Amino acid sequence: MTSFILGKIDFDIPRLAEDVAAVKTMRKGRETYDEFSSGFWKNVPLWNENGDGSDGLFRDFGLPARPTEYASHVPYLTEVLEERFNLRQLVMVRARDIVDASMMPHKDFLELEEDPSHQFRVMIVLEDNEATYNSDEEKVFRMRTGEVWFLDAAGVHCAANFSTESRVSLCLDFSFNGPFTPADIFSSPNLYEPGSEPMIVKRQPLPEHFEMDIRRMAVACNRHNFRDLAFALAKLHFSYEVPNDACYDWLIEIADRTDDPALVAKAEQAKDFYIADRKIHERFSFTEW
Ligand SMILES: [Fe+2]
């Protein structure tokens, strides 16, 4: 099941604006998953296992989640969550603000022991930003304000904001012990209204000889810019018709043409960590050698 629109929220715009402003002023704590992103990427836990707003680690636990101290700063959003969603199945809610930022394409839930098909991630954008894109294994798309999206986080997915304007969103995680349908995440089944047309981003065909030509980047690739290069390659699928994980093979090809075997090992580790196999608490760094 790839990402799709589950429904729509007609926000009270003035009340929403107050809460969006509050999210922007929330303290940016130490990011739990900072190897995944580059640029300004703030995640604030609004609901989690223990109600502690400094705990951003995602884990599946005995439900349901509890509001953190930050939830009281966003009363309207709290009201919307309580009215519209099935909070009994809620694991976590994060408010997110991204500015001039991108992430490495990755799969979530790899590190969990539980079956990832029991996890259901939902994104709700709170302010429109035309320079912000998401991708899954099939498409690049733009989420518009109020759209409630299922995000296929068990598959390879990615996001970027190519502007210096913020883009605030909510990320909701639900977990189920047994079979469920998307309607089960809502407080009432009639809030599940699939079928809306998503805004798909049109991409260009990959230029001829691109995959040969890109290997020439090896002449400018070293340990000091390897992280920059990885994030730069990861952005290309937003413009060109290539799978969002193509960057990992390009990175390996480029590293392979340098005279530094550590770069090849790092590129292979990156592919493994982000999209294949990752243990709980395992970390990865593009800058430690
Ligand atoms: Fe993710």
Image: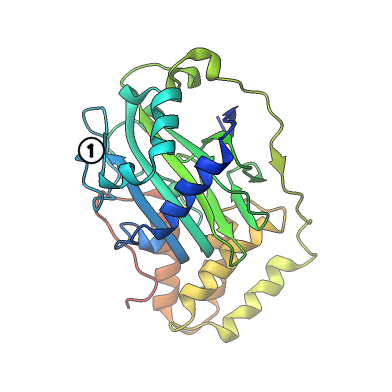
Q: Is residue 20 above or below residue 230?
A: above
Amino acid at the residue labelled 1 = Glu
Counting other residues with Cα less than 10 Å from the Cα at mark 1, is it few (<14), some (14-19), or many (20 or more)? many
For numbered disc 1, what is the local secondary structure? loop
* Residue at image location 49% in from the left, 21% down from the top: 182
* Front one among 97 and 246: 97
Q: In this view, does 16 lie above or below 189?
A: below
Q: Quadrant of residue 4?
A: top right
Give left or right: position of 21 versus 61.
right
Instruction: Tell me how many marks there are.
Output: 1
Q: In this rendering, does residue 86 appear at all?
A: yes
Percent x, y for residue 129? Answer: 63, 54
Q: Quadrant of the C terminus?
A: bottom left
**Residue that label 1 marks:** 49
* Front one among 53 and 79: 79
Residue extending farthest top: 189
* Residue at image location 55% in from the left, 78% down from the top: 257
Q: Quadrant of the N terminus?
A: top right
Percent x, y for residue 121? Answer: 44, 35
Give left or right: position of 180 versus 3.
left
* Residue at image location 66% in from the left, 58% down from the top: 131
Q: Quadrant of residue 263?
A: bottom left
Percent x, y for residue 142? Answer: 65, 46
* Residue at image location 65% in from the left, 62% down from the top: 236
Percent x, y for residue 216? Answer: 65, 79
Q: Quadrant of residue 207?
A: bottom right
* Front one among 92 and 151: 92
Colour mode?
rainbow
* Front one among 211 and 203: 203
Q: In this rendering, does residue 46 appear at all?
A: no
